[in-house]
Image (cartoon, grey):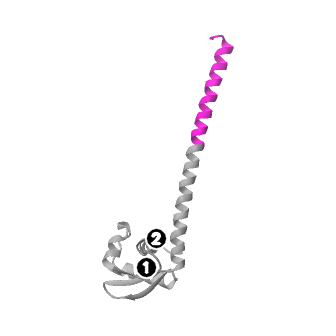
Amino acid sequence: MLDKRCLALLNIINGECVGTGYKIFSISDLVASMPMHFGMDGAGVYECVKTLSEREYISVKYQDDKEICLSPLTKGRLVFENKIDEELEKSRAEKRYFFFSFIGGLLGGGAAVILTVIILAITGVF
């Protein structure tokens, strides 16, 4: 399993790479694209690239001190697509929970009104 830093980098790579071709990234751009709470620097990016490459999530064509040419592999794309599917499923579940809560509120309110009418009818207020 990948750590959060490597997943964030893979997410950036998948978002930038269209199709199956290689793309040249500036190390400084990758560092700037990473979330600030990771505190990434060039060495951290190289470490994540190495990890992703070793685990066959990305293919590195070449790299130097300032640039890196890479492409996501099928395994890396699947991680990205599965994450999108999980987010969509979570959104659907949240909508279902809202719907059930809304229906429960309506039914509970309706039951309270009916109970109040019955009590008032029994006590003779009507």
Based on the displayed image, in which of its 4 quarters is residue 106 positioned? top right
Q: CA distance from mark 1 to mark 2?
A: 10 Å
The kind of secondary structure element at disc 1 is: helix
Q: Give the residue displayed 34% in from the left and 88% down from the top.
A: 64
Q: Nearer the viewer, residue 91 or 112?
A: 91
Image position of 23 with respect to 79: above or below: below
Q: Is residue 122 magenta?
A: yes
Rate crowding at label 2 as few (under 14), some (14 to 19) or many (20 or more) other CA atoms within 10 Å. Answer: few
Position above or below: 80 against 110: below
- Number of the label disc, if any, that sits on residue 4: 2
Q: Which residue corresponds to the image point at 57% horizontal and 58% vertical from the top-left?
A: 89
Residue at 53% across, 55% down: 91
Secondary structure predominantly adopted by residues drawn in magenta: helix
Q: Position of residue 108 (x, y in %)?
A: 61, 33
Residue 25, quarter of the rendered image: bottom left
- The amino acid on which the numbered mark 2 sits, given as a three-letter code, is Lys
* Residue at x-position 31% and y-position 86%: 65
Segment colored magenta = 100-126
Q: Amino acid at mark 1?
A: Cys
- Dot 1 alpha-carbon crowd within 10 angstroms: few under 14, some 14 to 19, many 20 or more: many
- Mark 1 highlights which residue? 48
